[in-house]
Amino acid sequence: MTFEEEYLLALCIWREARSASVAAWLGIYWVIQNRIGKPGFRPSLSRVILQPFQFSSFNKNDPNVTRFPIKAKTPDWTTWTRIRELIVAPGPDPTFGALFYESFPVDKLPEIRQHQPWFSAAKQTAKIGPFRFYRA
């Protein structure tokens, strides 16, 4: 993995789950890794992360799109450093091969299922903190 890919991966995890647990960060790490080269996804880490509408924190209208750990009101060095360490030695996949995740309130799930094509065929593989992980 190049420095740029490592940085992008850490940024994605930080933006998507910085206030969650280390276990949740690991789940997001593995969703990204599990997608690389799978049908319907891009063939490289950077292309998986930057594929439009895959990780909301990279969408133009998402409030996280301009957030960086060093630009935060209070720089978030501890979280950033821990995420960077996780990337170097991630350990086993706690999502059991998940390709998707979400953290919508449970009462919104029926509505979300109608508007997300992947969601109708997905089976939940894990729940880690606020995130539910799925495999199609």
Image (tube, helix red, strand yellow):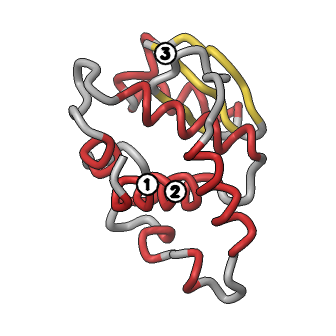
What is the x, y in percent for residue 27? 62, 34
> Considering only order in the chain, which callout, 2 or 3, is on the residue closer to the N terminus?
2
Write down the quadrant of residue 5 in the picture: bottom left
Kindly identify which residue carries mark 2. 10
Q: Nearer the viewer, residue 58 or 109?
A: 58
Residue at x 78%, y 38% (from the top left corner): 129
Q: State the CA–CA distance, disc 1 to disc 3.
A: 24 Å
The answer to whether the residue labelled 3 contacts the one labelled 2, judged by CB atoms less than 8 Å apart, is no
Q: Amino acid at mark 3?
A: Arg
**Secondary structure state at the residue bearing disc 3:** strand
Kindly identify which residue carries mark 1. 6
Q: State the CA–CA distance, disc 3 to disc 2.
A: 23 Å
Task: Tell me if 42 is positioned left or right of 70 in this view.
Answer: left
Q: Is residue 6 above or below residue 54?
A: below
Instruction: Work out which quarter of the rendered image holds the C terminus and state it.
Output: top left
Residue at x 43%, y 25% (from the top left corner): 34
Q: Nearer the viewer, residue 30 or 130?
A: 30
Q: Amino acid at mark 1?
A: Glu
Kindly identify which residue carries mark 3. 135
**Secondary structure state at the residue bearing disc 1:** helix
Q: Amino acid at mark 2?
A: Ala
What is the x, y in percent for residue 115? 39, 32
Classify mark 3: residues with Cα within 10 Å, few (<14), some (14-19) or many (20+): many
Classify mark 2: residues with Cα within 10 Å, few (<14), some (14-19) or many (20+): many
Residue at x 57%, y 36% (from the top left corner): 102
Write down the quadrant of residue 134 in the picture: top right
